[in-house]
Amino acid sequence: MKPKILLVDDEQDVVDGYRRTLRRNYEVLTALSGREGLELIDSSEPPCVVVSDYRMPEMNGVEFLAQVRERRRDTVRIMLTGQADFEAVTQAVNEGNVFRFMTKPCSADALMHALDAGIEQYRLVRVEKELLNKTLTGAVKAINDILALVHPGVFGRIARIRRIVGDLAREFHEEKAWQWEIAAMLSQVGCVTLSGEMLAKMRKGEELKADEQKMFLHHPKIGAELISNIPRLEEVSRIVEYQEKNFDGSGPPANDIRGEDIPLGARVLHVVLAYDRMLLAGGMEAQALFQIKKKSDMYDSSLVAALEKVLNVEALPTQRILISDLEIGMVLAEDVLSPEGLLLLAKGQEVTATLKRRMENLKESQQKEQYVEVEWR
């Protein structure tokens, strides 16, 4: 299959010349304006590379490539123009985040060389994303599955936290959303050092003693140190370390960093964790948001507003099903307890293959099969 490219220029003769020259080696899409180019990008599989002229009516090349970047971050962007002035180059690099800047007239060989380099860059980015999505995220998920079996009350929160963090990442069109989601998945790793009794108190929303509170506030640092040993997760480690840092600079770690100097991912995680803790303590959504909005010194107000926006949806309907009918991907709408009253799985936890087997084992150990409430998705 030929790699797909998009060429945008407001001169029909130039576009036709591009198509004739390049169609042997590439699947060529063309557009006569930035608006037309964006319509093509939105309506089909994204091209590997976009080449745009600088001077076009309505929307110049810099504005167009900036829009391409917003819509298709992986697509490589090349600027082609006869106006090789410093201001155009600066704009193209800063606003369009271009891969190459080329001047007219441009030979076919030079253009194809730039296109091939852009296609290779696109391929590398895609391969890296696939590695992160399948390998790294899969490994992190496996770790959480194991921890959820040991401490279901704490690690059952992960599915809820991750979903909200993911919604916020999409709201902010965050380029490194994968870092936020992995940070959410690993946010409670440091809690493995806390006692079962203390974890139970936290789950019930009970007030911690002074020494317990000190231990709790140390868990982000422990988690960050563990994560820092994993390649490519340096920024994730920093997000986890700062997840309990208040917007006014109070809270761990004890330093002078405050406000927007706190990593954005950490600020997101901070407000989501606080919201989830309030729900665990028995609060309703509206009550939890109201309490968070009152504490402007603790949370980034722009993130609180975004949280309120992404949560502004009707609650998912639920249904009661037999444990044997559970399917991977379902989300529990209630806690699951053993016959002795021990917490096995927590409300909000997503059913994985490992957890499904555990539920099936529970069914086999009981005389009567248990029903469980799940969200209908």
Image (cartoon, helix red, strand yellow):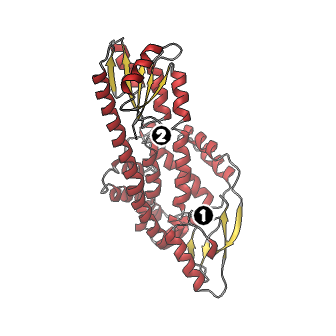
Q: Residues within 10 Å of mark 1 (few under 14, many from 20)?
A: some
Distance, label 1 to label 2, CA atoms, is 27 Å
Residue marked by disc 2: 174
Q: Is residue 335 above or below residue 42?
A: below
Q: Is residue 331 left or right of residue 17?
A: right
Label 1 secondary element: loop
Q: Percent x, y for residue 315?
A: 70, 54
Front-most of 117 and 331?
Answer: 117
Q: Is residue 143 above or below residue 94?
A: below
Residue farthest bottom in this picture: 367
Q: Report the amino acid beneath label 2.
A: Glu
- The answer to the question of whether label 1 and label 2 lie on touching residues, with beta carbons closer than 8 A, is no
Residue 271 appearing in the image: no
User: Who's the residue at 51% across and 69% down the image?
Assistant: 353
Q: Report the amino acid beneath label 1.
A: Met
- Which numbered dot is residue 65? none
User: Who's the residue at 54% across and 59% down the image?
Assistant: 159
Q: Percent x, y for residue 248?
A: 48, 41
Residue 104 appearing in the image: yes
Location of the N terminus by quadrant is: top left
- Which numbered dot is residue 330? 1
